[in-house]
Amino acid sequence: MSVHLTREEVARKELGRTEVTPRLAWIIVAIYLATMALPPCLQIAIHIAGPHAASVSGGEASQQSSTVHPSTASLLPGVAPEVRIRSLSYLVGLIPSARQLREFEDRLNEASLPTQTLAPWVGWAIKGILHGGDEQAYFGRGGWLFYRPSVDSVTGPGFLTRTWQQERLRTADKSLPLPQPDPLKALIQFHGQLAARGIALVVIPTPGKESLHPEKLAPQWSCAMNVVQNPSFELFKAELAKAGIDVFDPAPLLEEMNHRTGGDVYLKTDTHWTAPAMEHAASRLANWMQERGLAPAPGSGDWQTHTQTVFNTGDIAVMLNLPKGQRIYPAENVQITRVVTTEGRPWEPDATAPVLLMGDSFCNIYSLAEMGWGDSAGFAEHLSMALRQPIDRLAINAGGAYSARQELVRELASGRDRLAGKRVVLYQFAARELAFGDWKLLDLPQVAAQSQKTASVGGELVVQGRVSAIARLPQPGSVPYKDCLIAIHLTQVRGSSSGAAENELLVYAMGMRDNRWMPVSSLPVGGNIQCRLSDWAKVEKKYGGYNRAELDDLDLLSLPTFWLEEVTK
């Protein structure tokens, strides 16, 4: 009579016959422990053997790291109660906050030896060859790459639904202030602020590539003829129209161009549109403004154009962190059209122009040379040429939801009236920000007196001060921008070589370069530094469009603003 054993019984029976000698067991344990210990040991050895940078902190931070705080002696019996209370308060203060723990985790991940050495090759095998999953990218057909948050923004729930906005708050990073998830509140507020000064607002939600090229993402969309949008998008436009806000939606004209020409309107491995698609959108926007009486009378349009071919690796491909020299996702080539003056100088924004274009990287691509796609050939340049009028531009990478508006607040608070003489503000932003952006409610301040705020110092300052707060940088490779500025709140400022009397400063520095955190990002809060500063206005043309890690305290925007050239001590 045969007895049928279950799979669990068979496994138990077979395992029961497995014999492991004590010697083999110790060998297996030793190999496991050595494997686990090898990376950190190597990293410690490299750190000890490598050159050490000079400490940039002093005062309080140095004392706390090298000595025992005197108040710890108050834990001994017989010490006065008030001293014990101070001691306990100090010990409680040593407990790291949620933000500090998250920053420590980010830095540990960035500095780890496996991340620097093994991750690119593991990614090459999993992402490049097997097309496995990734936190930042979806792998499309024919070598196309899609930015995951952008895809999720159109395939997910409606961004205006109460359920989605509550979910945003529930899942938000608790170490940071809660986001404001409703774009309507921020845009209607901004519209009212501009209308009070007689300025019209035009909203330009720029779609992602998944909206125009869904067939590159999934085969079932191969015959799609309609733009793919978030379920709340049409309601969003209707609510803005009800509030008296004009909306210029580039999606239909890009769709029409896509079907008419049969060419791609978005880059294959990048989040942004192609140069011809961007130029087409700028031309149609100019016509749209003229039809509605929003455009100034055409001028002479004293500009010339020159074509140029540029080669660059897409930002999504860069985020994959593949080994250098990989050819799975090669560089793309794009023909751009540069806009220059008759003397051959690059187009520049005009602060006195009646039109202000506020935007994000969709404006900066082909304009900001550091993005790798050329310069003087972007959205503002071609819109200006189509209008035959100079325009002003305030565009910051990743700045769609609030950074551009926040920079406007900073300028007004510091005495520079960026809205003086303006008739129209064009507010461009990536459509994915509607679902995932932080739509902060910002008050536009009265223009501060220049004499009371940031008077230009002309040259450089050498100051000492205390790092009261420093912004939190994004994890390298987690955003489509390889460079990022970091904001620093400097207090107890003294020793200025120019004699400036300000006690507090808002300082920007290069916090991340080529997806690597810079040493300045490790400045300890509470530490004292000596540094060389220059006017922010002096470098704004070069660095003003970069992605920024901002501080949460909006009151700091009224402080004099400088650029950190170097930490000298």
Image (spheres, helix red, strand yellow):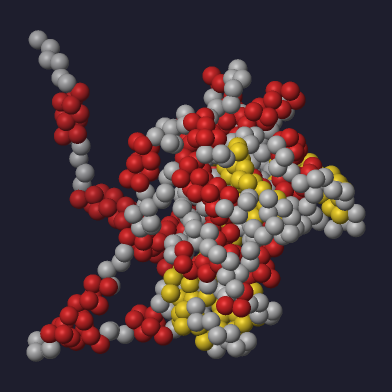
Q: Quadrant of the N terminus?
A: top left
Residue appearing at x 28%, y 72% in the figure: 94
Q: Residue at x 46, y 83 (%)?
A: 492
The answer to whether residue 269 is visible is no
Where residue 520 appears, x then y in whole percent? Answer: 52, 70
Residue nearest the viewer, comparing 15 with 361: 361
- Give residue 205's quadrant in the image: top right
Where 256 sits versus 316, above or below? above
Question: For this rendering, which residue is in front, 248 or 491?
Answer: 248
Give the residue furthest to the top. Answer: 1
- Could one spot residue 246 in this view of the protein? yes
Percent of width and height locating residue 188: 50, 45
Judged left or right of residue 2, residue 349 is right
| Foreground pick, 513 / 454 | 454
Residue occupying the point 49% across, 78% down: 504
- Classify residue 99 as left or right of residue 316: left
- Does residue 180 lie above or below 99 as drawn? above
| Image location of residue 487, percent across then percent down | 52, 66
